[in-house]
Image: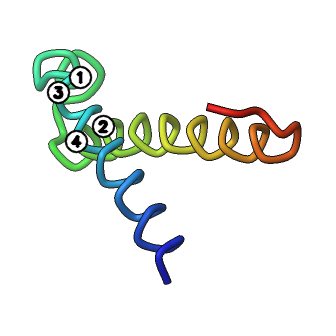
Amino acid sequence: MSIFIRIALRYGAAVLVTRGLLGSDDAAAVSSDPDIQMAIEAGIGFAIAGVTEAWHWAAQKFNWSH
């Protein structure tokens, strides 16, 4: 169960970080539709989360230590 909580927290953090990195003006330059702006923000957040999970997987596979 704790692994699901860890993953959920990572994805939630990535979305929050993305909302801070990608401002509404930046998203508005791509599209004026608020739904598309939110999809862009969430997409970047999920990309950050994906990189985090890939890094975690590689660390376990190659026995990297902290």
Q: Which of marks 2 and 1 is nearer the N terminus?
A: 1
Residue 34: x percent and y percent?
A: 15, 43
- From this view, report whether residue 50 is shown above or below residue 19: below
The residue that disc 4 covers is: 16
Mark 1 lies on a secondary structure that is loop
Query: Mark 3 or mark 2: which is in front?
Result: 3
Nearer the viewer's eye, disc 4 or disc 2?
4
Label 4 to label 2, Cα distance in Å?
9 Å
- Tag 1 residue: 22
- According to the picture, the residue beneath numbered tag 2 turns out to be 41
Contact flag, marks 3 and 4 (Cβ < 8 Å): yes
Residue 13 vertical position relative to residue 65 in the rendered view, above or below:
below
Nearest to N terminus: mark 4 or mark 2: 4
Q: What residue type is labelled 2?
A: Glu
> In the image shown, does 40 or 17 lie closer to the viewer?
17
Amino acid, disc 4 = Leu
Alpha carbon of mark 2 to alpha carbon of mark 1: how far? 7 Å
Q: In this view, does 44 lie to the left or right of 21?
A: right
Residue 30 sits in which quadrant?
top left
Between 23 and 17, the one lying in front of the other is 17
Q: Mark 3 points at which residue?
A: 20
Q: Is residue 44 left or right of residue 35?
A: right
Crowdedness near tag 2: few (<14), some (14–19) or many (≥20) residues, C-alpha within 10 Å: many
